[in-house]
Structure formats: structure tokens, C-alpha cells
Image (cartoon, rainbow, N blue to C red):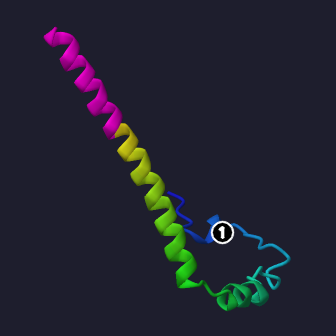
Amino acid sequence: MNNKGFADNQTNIETPNDVGMTEKPLKSKINEKIKERVDINVLKSKLKETESKEFKKNLYILSSLILILGFLGIYLSL
């Protein structure tokens, strides 16, 4: 039995040549994001606007369903 062990099974793994040049995020982009401030009043107005649109849509759907049920009830009762 010829048992050589792990000593003969070594393989050479090559690393890329540009190991020293790792990509890092630019600090200027991070600083720009930090400096941008959001006005709370703008956010509130956008939220109110979207909520009013949703409310109007829901009110329209509800009123149309009630109207359809009313017409259907009148039609079936005749």
C-alpha cells in the first residue's frame, strides 16, 4: 500500500493581480446622501395627497356598488 497522504495533493491557487485595488464606495456619494435633508411638511403633503386619492377612489367604488344594488333591488321588486 502506497499512502502518500495530503502532501502530494497540494494545488497552487493563484490570486488576482489587482488585490490591492479593491473597490470602495466613494465618500462623496455618502456625504451627499447625508447632506440631503427632507422637509417633514413635504412628506406630510405627499401623504395627504395619496390618501385623498385613495379615499376618493374608494368612495367612488362604494357609491357605485350601492347604486347598482339599489337599481337591482328596484328592478327585481317590480
Q: Which residue is mark 1?
A: 10
Question: Which residue is rendered at x = 83% and y = 83% of the image?
Answer: 21
Residue 40 location, x and y as percent? 53, 83
User: Where the C terminus falls, by quadrant?
Assistant: top left
Q: Residue furthest right?
A: 17
Q: Is residue 69 above or below residue 35?
A: above
Left/right placement of residue 25 relative to residue 70 reads right
Q: Please state if 70 lies on the left or on the right of 6 as rendered.
A: left
In this picture, residue 78 sits left or right of residue 36: left
Q: Is residue 56 left or right of residue 25?
A: left
Amino acid on which the number 1 mark rests in the picture: Gln
The magenta region covers: 62-78
**Residue at 39% across, 41% down:** 60
Where does the image place residue 58, in percent across and percent down from the top left? 37, 46
Residue depicted at 44% across the width and 60% down the height:
51
Q: Tell whether position 24 is magenta.
A: no
